[in-house]
Each structure stands twice: as structure tokens, then as C-alpha cells.
Image: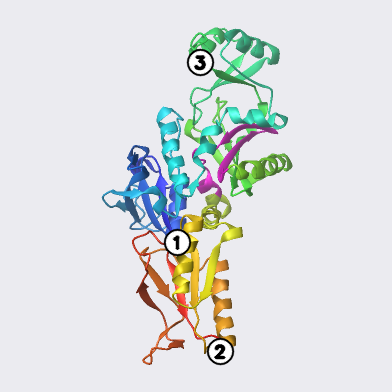
Amino acid sequence: MRILIVLDPVDSIKTYKDSTYAMMCSARARGHSIEVCEVGQLWLGEGHAWADASVLTLSGPQLGEDGHDPYHWCTQAEPVSTRISDFDAVLMRKDPPFDAEYVYATWLLEHAVREGAKVFNEPRAIRDHGEKYSIAEFAQFTADTIVTRDPVRLRAFVQRHGEAVFKLLDGMGGASIFRARADDPNLSVIIETLNQFGARSVMAQRFLPAITDGDKRVLIIGGQVVPFALARIPKLGEARGNLAAGGTGRAQPLSARDREIAESLAPILSSRGLFLVGLDVIGDCLTEINVTSPTCFREIATQTGLRCGRPVHRGTRTRACPPHMIGILVISHEPLGTALLHCTRHIFGRLPVQLAALDVIPDEDPEAALHSAQELLKRINDGSRGDRTDRHLWRDAGAHCGPTGRAESGSGDRWRESADSGQGADLSARATRRSE
């Protein structure tokens, strides 16, 4: 697969903890090609969505290998303008803040989706799910919460509960989170600072004492709940467990309540195009739904041995060609086979990731032809057609024409130009067999 990752500057990646780096390592282990770009390298032109993408190569020892250098672990080629829809999968891994530029990026990626790109998470879903606000849809799992610009309501909320936590709706990493007490002489100052005298919306949540046991990150990948959470324990004197705020991560099995929340939300969020999700749970209460660039894969993998990157790439491969439409096998004689391939492109807008064509001629042994078809179907269904290393060639697998010009089995593989080369055709296999 050819994968594009939209991310922050590569030199900001911390290999010992970065989930995007974990995904890169998993992709390389499977032979996938990785290209990267920043949000500022997405653009629209000639009616198409483009990315100025650089091929990224993991070089030298990687994390866990002797001699790993956290500052020199990859090389990047010069960026090349490429249509986003030419990639097999696009991972949106840009960190918040979710500002106007982030919104513009989702517009561009959504344009790419209309052109056939597979983007994870789906751009519209990212835009529609504010990481703080989206918990309102699942109030049965949350602590008492309000969102308002009214400082009087914020003060009354604290008075009612005795203690509350204030958050800005576009904050991240524990920034601008305040724990406020009803008797705090600075309560008015906290409210004024956050909501700017009524000009800015603020979320207030009932304070949860269970924060001392950690702010738990529960991961959902492709609608499946990861069985471990990362409990982020606040440092002494802190009410924030975020790792960016100095918290310490401790992997632990999901509690019954963690699993109840995650399994309730997983199918809903997955159906909306949210492939990678990080739920934040304190005690028994859902506090945030992170969809922009969920983290904690690396910490969970390090402490438990669970390889979170693997389901990411299994899922992107499957969703790039969904289970109910993972591929097509065309069985026909030429030139009908080529015509059917053209029809396939016309119907689906692009050729499927997994495509094979079995050419038959009248005097082939039917059993041999059936065996060949079954082998091709097996390879299509298990996704082993191969990565798209050259988009302008068809692979002629399993047999080729011998000296007589007739098809001979067991002769190995060869490559042949496709009539659709230059059309962005997917790498496909063609096997020539004699059949009745």
C-alpha cells in the first residue's frame, strides 16, 4: 500500500512515545510505502485535491534496536505534488488545536474523499465531533456538564457541586484546564480568564476525585475496543493526568465500566467514519472523545506487548477495499476481459485494490481452469494480491505463454503493460489458462 500521513513536522516526533511513529514502523514491517506532508502542503488546483508529499524512509536502528538515534531515524525525499486520491490510504494525524486552518484541511481532504481517497479519520466526522463537546451525545456516561459563555452560570455550577473543572472547547494536552472550588478567592479571575468576560464558551464538569487513579485513555480501532487502557496518573499536586502536563502513564486492563462505555460508543463512532478514537474516562465517567490524532498506542504496546499498530494497518487495508467488496475476479477470453476491466472502472470510479483476471481459451482443461480461479479468489479474499509498487503494470501471475504461443502453467511470473496504464490503475494480477 501507498500511505500518506498528514502530520506535524517530522522533527517534532518523539519516537519513544509517538503513536504516529508506531504506525510508521508497522507500515514498514508490512512493506508499505510511507509519504508524509504537513497541513500547509495540502492544496486544491485544477479541480483536484493535492498534497506536496515526501517519501519517508525509516533509516538506521529504530526504537528498541541498538544504536537508535531519536533525532536521526528517517530520511525524507523532496516533496512531489501528488493527487491525494492516488494514495491507497491517508492518515490524518495532525495534532490540535482545532482552529480555522484545521477546518480548511478537512475541507481539502473531504474533496479528496469525493475523488475516491480513503481518509482515516473521515474529514467530515473529525469536523463534526468536537473532542470536548461530543460527549454531550452520550450524557448517560458523563458527569454533570454544562457549556456556556455566561459567567453567572459557570459560577453557579461550581457553587452547586463545590468543585468543578473548567475547559476551553479547543484546548489540548491539558492546556487551559482549571480546577475551581466554590470557596476559591480566585474563582472570578479563573472564569474571566477563560471566558473573556462572556466572549468565549467554556465547558464545566463536576470534579471527579477518581482522577487520582488516572485519566484513562481507552482506544477504539476500526470499531474494535483495545483491551488495555493507559491510566495517566497526575503528578503530585496536579489535577491533570495528561502526559503533556507531566502525568505518568500506566497500562492496565479495561474495567467493566470502561468496556461498557467503549463498546457502546464503538459501533456508533465507527459507522460515522471515525476509525481511530481515544476515549478519556475518569472513574466511571466519559470526559472526552478524541478523534483528531489519538495517542497512547506506544505506551500501551511497550507495557503490555500489544501491538496497536497492527490493527490500524489491517483496518486501513480492509477499509480501502471493504470486506463486502474486497475485489473482483474476471474470467473471460480476450478482448472481452479488457472491456470488462474498463466497465469495472466506469462503475466504481476506480479499480478495486484487489483485482484479478483469468483469461480462458476454448481447449483448456476445465478442472485446471477451476483450480486457477479458486487460487486467485483465495488470494483476493485474504488481501495477498500484493502492494501497489507500480500503478502502470498488471502482474501476470501463475502462467505465461510458452514458445508455441499457447498458455503454459507453472512458468512463473512476468509483467505486461496494461491498456489502462496512465489511468492510475491499481496493481492487478492476470493469469492466462486454457479452458473450455
Q: Which mark is residue 365?
A: 2
Three-letter code, disc 1: Ala
Determine whether 376 is above or below 315 in the image.
below
Separation (CA) of disc 1 from disc 3: 46 Å
Separation (CA) of disc 1 from disc 2: 40 Å
- Tell me which segment is drawn in magenta: 273-300
- Say few, some or many: other residues with alpha carbon within 10 Å of mark 1 (under 14 / 14 to 19 / 20 or more): few
**Which residue carries the number 3 mark?**
200
**Which residue carries the number 1 mark?**
29
- Secondary element at image label 2: loop
Q: Earlier in the sequence, mark 1 or mark 3?
A: 1
Q: Earlier in the sequence, mark 3 or mark 2?
A: 3
Determine whether 80 is above or below 142 in the image.
below
The verdict on residue 89 being magenta is no
* Residue at (70, 34) in percent of width and height: 284
Horizontal side, residue 281 vs residue 365: left or right: right
Residue 151 occupies quadrant: top right
Give the x, y percent position of residue 162: 68, 14
Residue 160 occupies quadrant: top right
Give the x, y percent position of residue 309: 51, 53
